[in-house]
Amino acid sequence: MIPIKIESAYRGTADCRHCGIRDMVLFGDLDEPDFDMLHVPIDQLELKEAASLYAERSPSQGIFTLRTGMIKLVRVTTDGRQRIVRVLRPGDVAGLEALATSRYDSEAVALTDVAVCRIPLDVIHTLEASSEHLHRRLTLKWQQALKEADDWLADLNFGTARQRVCNFILKMRSPTDSRVAMLFSRDDMGAMLDLKPETISREVTRLVREEVIEPLDKLGRIYRVLQLERLQTV
């Protein structure tokens, strides 16, 4: 992949036909004739951990499909606190609200090193008008985003601190290995769960001590789930 700075102009570095995760991303259902309509270049971008993809309330540049890594969507509350409203993983779309508004609802920040495809709005509007496949995929992505946002609020912002931490671990399990979960800095988790970082550290330590999970790295970011039923029934 060619590394491109986020402020660079579109250069058309993406190859949607041969994308390695094409079945997961927005253009997964496109037919060959649809690709002939992609006259506006689509770029691949690489961002380092903690880099911002776009800012809250900033003018929309397009939408982004996540190829690798994870992104957090952050909003600032009326009292000035940052709240993480959702975490995106490969195959997810960032900035869908740009299709209906001229600005992004949240700030998108890389939780890890990430790679994304930046898709100009002109491409989406052109294909949506002519491709039933893309229109259907957009509708499904939008419905999925709304459901995940509702689930995030319901599962991670209510209940005891232990319940929130356990539900978060369940949500952050790897799609390829359900026994492995990737967590984040305690400050990030606090912004996700509306808990103090020290409370989260205490609950994670308790789960390790009770042998519900075990750390797989020295930073306390990756854990193996040892007792799945304990997490599910807390």
Image (spheres, grey):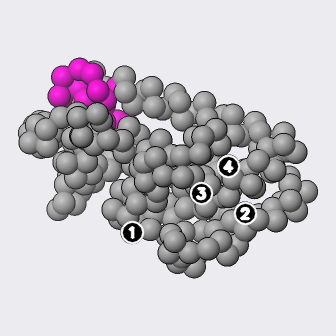
Q: In this figure, which residue is indicated by the disc labeled 3?
A: 61
Residue occupying image coordinates x 56% and y 75%: 8
Q: Nearer the viewer, residue 231 or 85?
A: 85
Q: Residue furthest right?
A: 33
Relative to 89, is 167 on the left or the right? left
Q: Which residues are magenta?
A: 155-173
Residue occupying image coordinates x 46% and y 56%: 54
Q: Count neighbours of disc 4 (C-alpha within 10 A) and say few if under 14, some if 14 to 19, many if 20 or more.
A: many
Q: What quarter of the picture does the N terminus occupy?
A: bottom right
Q: Residue furthest bottom?
A: 2
Give amino acid for label 2: Cys
CA–CA distance in space, label 3 to label 2: 19 Å
Residues marked 1 and 3 touching at CB (< 8 Å)? no
Q: In this figure, which residue is indicated by the disc labeled 1?
A: 48
Residue occupying image coordinates x 19% and y 54%: 220
Q: In this figure, which residue is indicated by the disc labeled 4?
A: 26
Residues marked 2 and 1 touching at CB (< 8 Å)? no
Q: Count neighbours of disc 2 (C-alpha within 10 A) and say few if under 14, some if 14 to 19, many if 20 or more.
A: some
Give amino acid for label 1: Lys
Residue 152: which quarter of the image?
Answer: top left
